Amino acid sequence: MSKRILLTGGAGYIGSHTYVALIEAGYEVVILDNFANAARRVPGALEQITGVPVTLFEHDVLDRAALDAIFAEHAFDAVVHFAALKAVGESVEKPLEYMQCNLGGLVTLMQAMAQAGVFNLVFSSSAAVYGVPESLPIPETAPLSHANPYGYTKLVGEEIIAQTCASDPRWSVGVLRYFNPVGAHTSGLIGEDPKDIPNNLMPYIAKVAAGELPQLSVFGDDYATPDGTGVRDFIHVCDLADGHVLSLNALFRDGLGHTVNLGTGQGYSVLELLGAYSKACGRDLPFQFTPRRPGDPAASYADPGLAKDVLGFKATRGLEEMCTSSWHWINTCAADN
Ligand code: UDP
């Protein structure tokens, strides 16, 4: 019998791509989402892509009574937990909202899981837990720190999980530290769809390409990197989604938790990404250099070795596919929302 998974935040950007990957891998999936940062059209798009009717509960992950009712109704084998706030700048302005949603949400969910006897969890963490990296590529053993309330919630979230696992051996948790997820599903039916002006690079470039924003501001041209602009480990969201399937498979196979990077191991600069996107959309995209954004490290890219050893994970989609899939999404669906 196929295993049943609760996917919190399953209508969001990474959650929706992971939903597709889980269904394709033969899992049964139930989505919990409050649509705080997800489009109403996503469940229909997921049905179109997978051909499977979506089971969805519209609740906040902080709603313990709703969680208890869902756990009572469905015998879940595991939870994949995406539901959280993720905008770094907003977290600086509203730290308590980030603590409540990201930490309160995690604690509430784990309490509901424990009560229901579900102890397998995959947790969305972030390369933000490495703060400003001391050396590159970044292994999982690198020192951990935080540069903003968002990063703090991921770091403390990992600690909450570690202490809970230490207290009760029934827990098996996969902690996945994402680098920079970009791109969209090949169907063009789901993708990243920020409600406001994007903070992140790729969705900002996409809006410039679509003519919705006049030009990209490149934050800093004097970093100690080959072209002076920031370098990041951009990973195709479908590769990231596959990483969640492998993480769940490993939890079910080994009964052991893991903490791994999900990245490609390859860094590209802001200008390289802009160049690749220009190629994908067929025109040179305008940009200007502006001062560095406070708190940004010059470069960040993963050591992907442990994820390969523990999960068998290896990103397969390159920079070109990241940009062409994003542009396809922008042209097919994002504009209709
Ligand atoms: N960046 C930029 N202009 C923007 C947004 C981001 O130059 O409008 C740069 C940023 O300084 C960093 C890289 O793009 O070097 C990736 O930033 P993003 O916010 O996407 O992800 P982060 O790595 O900060 O989580």
Image (tube, rainbow, N blue to C red):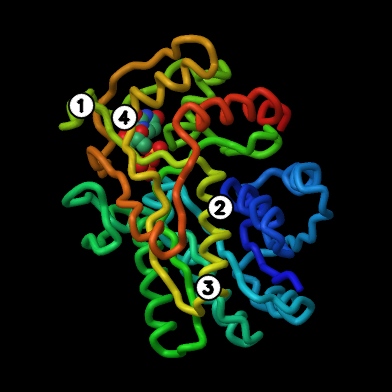
- Judged from the image, the secondary structure of the residue bearing numbered disc 4 is strand
Alpha carbon of mark 2 to alpha carbon of mark 1: how far?
A: 31 Å
Residue 199 as seen in the image, left or right of residue 137: right
Which residue is depicted at the point 56% across and 44% down? 238
- For marks 4 and 2, give the one nearer the viewer: 2
Q: Label 3: which residue? A: 251
Name the disc covering residue 242, or none. Answer: 2
Alpha carbon of mark 1 to alpha carbon of mark 3: how far?
A: 40 Å
Q: Earlier in the sequence, mark 1 or mark 3?
A: 1
Alpha carbon of mark 1 to alpha carbon of mark 4: how far?
A: 8 Å
**Dot 1 amino acid type:** Pro
x, y (%) of residue 291? 24, 27
Q: Nearer the viewer, residue 41 or 237?
A: 237
Q: Label 1: which residue? A: 226
Name the disc covering residue 269, or none. Answer: 4
Asked if residue 6 can be seen in this view, the reply is: yes
Name the quadrant of the C terminus: top right
**Dot 3 amino acid type:** Leu
Q: Are marks 3 and 2 in contact (CB under 8 Å)?
A: no
